[in-house]
């Protein structure tokens, strides 16, 4: 029973355009959401996070949107750059994160020149 | 140089042998976590520890054991009871009062 779902295993976007990665969750207790970027054979790198009291958080080229009623969040990357090609994981937690993070299966983003 | 160290990067073991994966951090973080990643899958939580000398099972703890004798160290032992030990193992830490976890570089364990 997956509590965090990333339904697109891969996404191809042209360089300079916007990349939109989606994530859905089922557990209404989740109150903090994170996006990680991962290259093969490396540990995930934290990108951006959002608390459930907000609906948007922005950091440079990265913006995360949260729609609590739909239990949906998305990561926008604009403009997309070749170095953005990686696997992106959505993660969620509740109660301060003491019990660890619940991850989606990831979306492989490919930026085409 | 602050960070999370996992060693070795690649590890090979014969079936039936126990193996211990190292995770060391000098970030002064209270909480430490072990995850495993399989191809095409997300990360799944094995064990975690919020303070020294205390740890809890995660979602897939069977066949694994941990210890937390020092704040800086959280070794994971993959025992012979773990049916599918071949995977990429990731250690993470956080300050305990924040939800943002930071990950080490990972150890690829292959059981032959």
Image (cartoon, coloured by chain):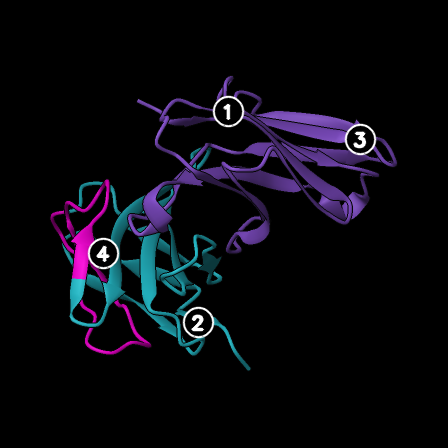
In the picture of the structure, the residue carrying the numbered disc 2 is: B5
In the picture of the structure, the residue carrying the numbered disc 4 is: B14
User: Mark 4 touching mark 2, by CB under 8 A?
Assistant: no
- For disc 1, the chain is A
Distance between the alpha carbons at the discs numbered 2 and 1: 36 Å
Mark with earlier residue (4, 2): 2
Q: Residue at x 22, y 42 (%)?
A: B60
Quarter of image, res B77: bottom left
Q: Residue furthest bottom?
A: B1
User: Are dots 4 and 1 on a single chain?
Assistant: no
Q: Is residue B4 rendered to the left or right of residue A63?
A: left
How packed is label 3: few (under 14 Cα within 10 Å), some, or many (20 or more)? some
Helix, strand or loop under label 1: loop
Helix, strand or loop under label 4: loop
In the picture of the structure, the residue carrying the numbered disc 3 is: A18
- For disc 2, the chain is B
Q: Nearer the viewer, mark 4 or mark 2?
A: 2
In the image, which residues are magenta?
Answer: B55-81
Q: Residue at x 39, y 34 (%)?
A: A30
Magenta span dominant secondary structure: loop
How packed is label 1: few (under 14 Cα within 10 Å), some, or many (20 or more)? some
User: Are dots 3 and 4 on a single chain?
Assistant: no
Q: Position of residue A113 (x, y in %)?
A: 87, 36
Q: Residue at x 33, y 62 (%)?
A: B32
User: Are dots 4 and 2 on a single chain?
Assistant: yes
In the picture of the structure, the residue carrying the numbered disc 1 is: A68
Q: Position of residue B96 (x, y in %)?
A: 36, 62
Q: Please, is residue A87 above or below residue B101 in the view? A: above
Colour chosen for chain B: cyan
């Amino acid at each position: 029973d997956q509590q965090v779902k990333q339904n697109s295993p891969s996404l191809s976007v042209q360089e300079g355009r916007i990349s939109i990665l989606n994530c859905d969750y089922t557990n209404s207790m989740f109150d903090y959401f994170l996006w990680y970027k991962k290259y093969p054979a490396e540990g995930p790198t934290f990108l951006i996070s959002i608390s459930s009291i907000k609906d948007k958080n922005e950091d440079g080229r990265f913006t995360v949107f949260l729609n609590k009623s739909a239990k949906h969040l998305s990561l926008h990357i604009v403009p997309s750059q070749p170095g953005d090609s990686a696997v992106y994981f959505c993660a969620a937690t509740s109660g301060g994160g003491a019990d660890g993070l619940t991850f989606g299966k990831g979306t492989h983003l490919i930026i085409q020149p | 140089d602050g960070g999370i160290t996992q060693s070795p990067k690649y590890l090979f073991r014969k079936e039936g042998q126990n193996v211990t994966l190292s995770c060391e951090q000098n970030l002064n973080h209270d909480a430490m976590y072990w995850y495993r990643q399989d191809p095409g899958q997300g990360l799944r939580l094995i064990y975690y520890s919020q303070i020294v000398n205390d740890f809890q099972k995660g979602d897939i703890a069977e066949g694994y054991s941990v210890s937390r004798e020092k704040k800086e160290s959280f070794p994971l032992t993959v025992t012979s009871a773990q049916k599918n030990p071949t995977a990429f193992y990731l250690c993470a830490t956080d300050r305990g009062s924040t939800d943002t976890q930071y990950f080490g570089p990972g150890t690829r364990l292959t059981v032959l």
